[in-house]
Image (cartoon, rainbow, N blue to C red):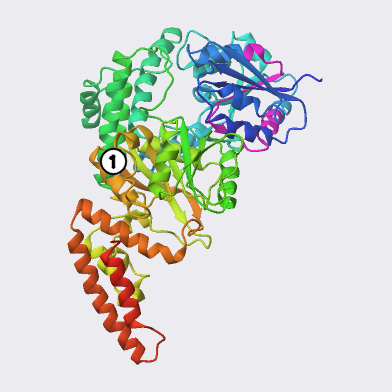
Amino acid sequence: MPAPLVSVVVPTRGGAGRLPVLLGALAAQTLAEPWEVVLVLDGDVDGSRAVAEAYADRVPLRIVERRGGDGVGAALAEGYAAATGDIVLRCDDDLTPAPGFLAGHLARHRDRPVGAPPLGVVSMTRDVFADTPYASAYGRPANERLLAEAYARPAGERWRHWAACNSVPRAAYEAVGGFDPTMGYREDSELGLRLAQAGVEIVIDPALEIEHRGPAPDTSTRAARAFTSGASTVAFDERHPGRHGDAPRATDPWGRAVASAARRIRSRPDAAALGRRIDTLLPHLPARARAKAVALAVEAAAVAGRRAGDDAWVRDVPDGEVTTVSVVIPHHGDPAPTLALLEQLAAQTHRVEVVVADDASPTPFPDVDGVTVVRRPRNGGFGANVNSGAAAATGEALLVLNSDLDVEPTFVADMVAAARAHPRAVLAPRMVDEHGTEAWVGRDFPRVRHAAAAWLTPLARFRGSDAWHRAVGHDVRAHRAEAEVDWVVGAAMWIPLADFRAVGGFDERFFMNSEEVDLQRRLRERGLSVVSLRSPTVVHEGGGSSPSDSRRRWLVEGQLLYADKWGSKRGLQAALTTATGVNLFVNATRRAAGRDIRPLEVARTELSMIRGPR
């Protein structure tokens, strides 16, 4: 087998959820010449080896496994030592290279004139954010500023951007002694400086920019990273005095504010705590003040890190980050939609545990490799069925999905990212039907007036208006932007599993409808928030599990039970009875005008629903 021309060195620790996207992108590379991937498994803490080995027939892969936990620099040093290509290219595990990426790097090195000094090629990372207040106020603008600064850097300063993705001849790397494995952080720019001092010409090529899926998702994480970054300048300056400059001085009002905040930060958790306070405030601040608030936390954390931090290496995982997800699919009836959803879940870029809860289907759901099937002896309805599936779940998060959904391969990974931005929250994705019409996922807690407005036949003509949606309890804000709401519809719903179990799961007295709002009300009392997201999006065909002639009766039964538990059942029955009287009058008028309506039959049906089961 010919020797590889390029060795792609990928350091990873806890990367089982990140590696599929990277390895899938590497499998799509257009480079026809020999190359290799050296995956440095820095301690297999989450089953990453099994994830990587699944790509061994698509990617020229070698795995270097080490005990790990002593820093990225040490892992990279071992990976570069194992590389055999003429060019070594570092690629972090949360990056997504375009198909021509490796060919582009190799071409830059091949185009080097004979006798010219060796070349170091930097790929800047373009951050991908969920749609959050932090991202719009600070994350995206800061990344754009960084990119603009990098592309404008003079040649002598480009080493500062030697970071997550770059390439250099292996001989040039070895000539400067490689990575310093004793550095917990800044191992990358420290190497970049030594390469530049040794005569390597460093270029930053905009055409080789690469997508970065792992930026700080919130102020808390960004401030914690800034604290560690500040601390790491101490070790860097010991090796290269004066290269980073002095700490900023408090010579103006902003500098004094930063210094004052920094004095209150004594540790990385302190920095994260300040960031969390800013995250809580962001949605309520004027738009112009949001970026300043985040910048204050980030700059103060960096100053404090220089003063009080240490460079002991820790894996940067945001507080409360979920890595294991259990999908529970309540199933009854035709197995085809559920089997189709299972195929989509098997293709997810973030691994999931899948549980199908079969609610005593007439035809038992078939056994499927890799899927846990829980079989109930009798049909108990949606909530009871999900409870049975959740009892078999082992993940940190419970993702309840109706069987008639279509999801993209990155759906679970996107929900995990959203959970980083909203820890301890119930989350629901944006939802559309097969025609692209968006569902009203975010709702207000049910009130008698909502049910009465939905019951009134004369108001149906206004269904397309915001006024009607507000009248029936739809949260109109959540239809336009991500928003915290009272509750979300349960067709696709993310819930921290420990909290789900702590409140006893669904109330199994509800057969179908209102069980999700009852559950979310109890979760909110426990301190969880509820967020209607704008991304990701799922397609919900709808009606796949409920016969249409039963839906309205189940809806009313659920509303009455909810009202009996949380409000006034008699008040709801009285309001619906009054609305039935209005409907009777309107329907009688329509019948007199020649419409094919049976007013008395409709009224009797409505009244039987309002009285409820006896």
Location of residue 503 in the rendering, given as x and y in whole percent from the top left corner: 29, 37
Q: Please state which of residues 358 and 228 is positioned toward the viewer in this rendering.
A: 358
Location of residue 476 in the rendering, given as x and y in whole percent from the top left corner: 32, 59
Residue 485 seen in the figure: no
Question: Which three-letter amino acid code belongs to the residue tagged 1?
Answer: Leu
Q: Is residue 236 magenta?
A: no
Residue 492 seen in the figure: yes
Residue at the image position 42 percent from the left and 23 percent from the top: 316
Q: Is residue 90 magenta?
A: yes
Residue at the image position 25 percent from the left and 33 percent from the top: 277
Residue at the image position 24 percent from the left and 69 percent from the top: 576
Locate residue 610: give its quadrant. bottom left
* Figure label count: 1
Q: Please state which of residues 439 and 506 is positioned toward the viewer in this rendering.
A: 506
Q: Please state which of residues 187 and 555 is positioned toward the viewer in this rendering.
A: 555
460 in relation to 249, above or below = below
Q: Please state which of residues 244 and 428 is positioned toward the viewer in this rendering.
A: 428
Location of residue 554 in the rendering, given as x and y in whole percent from the top left corner: 36, 60
Residue at far right of view: 1
Q: Please identify the quadrant where the N terminus is shown.
A: top right
The segment highlighted magenta reads: 80-108
319 sits to left or right of 415: left
Location of residue 579 in the rendering, given as x and y in whole percent from the top left corner: 24, 73
Q: Secondary structure at mark 1?
A: helix
495 sits to left or right of 174: left
Q: Residues within 10 Å of mark 1 (few under 14, many from 20)?
A: many
Locate residue 248: give its quadrant. top left
Q: Please identify the quadrant where the C terminus is shown.
A: bottom left
Residue at the image position 57 percent from the left and 18 percent from the top: 41
Location of mark 1 (residue):
523
Locate residue 7: give its quadrant. top right
